[in-house]
Amino acid sequence: MRTQINIFVIVILASCLTYSCTDVLDVEPQGALVEGVEVDAQIMDKLITSVYAGLTSRFINLHHVTFQGPTSNWIADVRSDDAYKGGGGIVDQVPIHQCETYTLNASNDIAYNKWLNLTWAISRVNNALRTLDAYQNPNYPKATRSAELRFLRGHFMFDLLRNYNHVPWLDDKTLATDASNRQYQPSEVLAKIIEDFKAAYDVLPTTQPESARVNKLTAAAYLAKAYTENKQWDEAIKYADEVINSGKFGLIKEFEDLATLEEENGREMVFTVQFAYTQNPDLGHNIGNILNVTYSNVYPGGDDFYLGSQNLINAFKTDQNGLPLFDTFNEGNDITDSSYSNNIDPRLDFTFGRPGVPWKKTGVYTYPEWRRSLDYERNYSSKKHIIDAGDPRIHNGLPWGASGLNFCIIRYAEVLLWKAEALIESGKANEALPLINEVRNRAKGSTYVRSVDGTKPAGNYNIGLYPLQNWSQDYARKALRMERRLELAMEGHRLYDLNRWGITAQTINKYLVEEASKTPYLNGVTFTEGKHEYLPIPQSEIDKAPSLYKQNNGY
């Protein structure tokens, strides 16, 4: 069994690291937690552990705030063309419905609580760095721990930037009075985030005795991610190669095993938030995904949030060669129509519950038994966020969604696809082909979901590899973008991908027009370009520090 640091219980010492959002920068550097308390190695370790605990987003109220600003960013998928809010109707969690229908404003609870979780986590990083800087102990691994903290700050700041766009740079040396003297451009903040990841990479060891701690290869992977975001293709390739060539990571054999406790720290997982299996969901479980379990007799009382859109389901159609239908997948019959009998990518049934198809190893997904609200008649629940109901290690009863299953922020398949994207955009599309095919080949070789009676596959599964013939840059770009959507479905990436590619408004408005006849509450909804790509800065925070924060366009 792998050793993990216990990031789940937020130690009392961490309470002195928690401030209101406007206080994130307003802490004078000091060498002790409070006056008269001397820092020793044990206290220093607990402070750093409390920073890792920030990855769970469990600030203030364990349940309410966490699922409104989760680490998994599932609500960002709801803001894209990949997912419906779900739940007990459109009036259930209205702030999330506002995100889905682009009617949110600067008082929206989702915008506020996501901001809270990230800025409070950054506050913990910066205060731990100040304490560590003043801590004098020649036997303490000060350089390594400092590098870990800078990596974690880079992660939290990266998430803040891609959700809010116009954000200040928040570090351990800058006070709010200094930060207020200038407005950072998003590109400047991203450059500083990359500096943090690079500083971490330069110091961190390749392996750590506790597997939950970040290491040099974790930092290399995040550098590949950040450089892809910044369109620095050579650098993205360089750091992706470091991970790929390390020999320490690879694709696991079975796609569906990505959602098992056996593989939650397996070969594919590069950067993972560690959650725990306990019978007390307040101790260690993934409260951020507490709502995201299908409503059924298999998980009685599941909340049925975070449902795959019909558009995303249809994207899994394939042609006679097992290749995606890039431009026509949403035409004709839906995959879930009883009359549909054409080819589908097997990842559809690895990822979603589908009518008449077995759910993991327990139960069969059927309507209306597995549907909580007629507002979401097309409810396709994700299989990726919870272990099988028949597993004795699952939390027994409500809240089912508070799973002990880890949440993976970076997995190896995505590193392959970052490198492929960088190669395509730098004019080396042919070199990207085997990387994309490697991802597809794992899905092709996985054990397909069987019919209820077990006599045949549950669908006409056909997934093929791309041939080199006609593999132009334009075609390769389409293939890469579709591959990210299918491989990483329901993992919180879609909206950020669309933003990076500069096609968010056109993609989502086309989706909204097509989806309106199938999902009535989307009728008349529009996405405003230059506004809805990002969440608004919470108005309450701007009111407290008007010189520090700049509101995003349109809010």
Image (cartoon, rainbow, N blue to C red):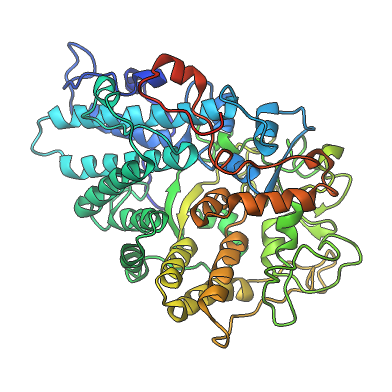
Residue 265 appearing in the image: no
> Residue pushed farthest right?
339
User: Does residue 341 appear left or right of residue 537 in this picture?
Assistant: right
Residue at 60 percent of width and 26 percent of height: 105
Looking at the rendering, which quadrant does residue 73 occupy? top right
Q: Position of residue 309 (x, y in %)?
A: 73, 51
Pick the quarter of the image with the C terminus: top right
246 in relation to 130, above or below: below
Q: Is residue 301 left or right of residue 384?
A: right
Residue 424, given in percent of the width and then of the height, sits at 45, 72
Total count of labels: 0
Tell me if residue 107 comes above or below residue 297 in the rendering.
above
Q: Is residue 547 left or right of residue 448?
A: left
Residue that appears at 70% across and 57% down:
312
Which residue is rendered at x = 77% and y = 62% of the image? Answer: 330
Identify the image quadrant of residue 245.
bottom left
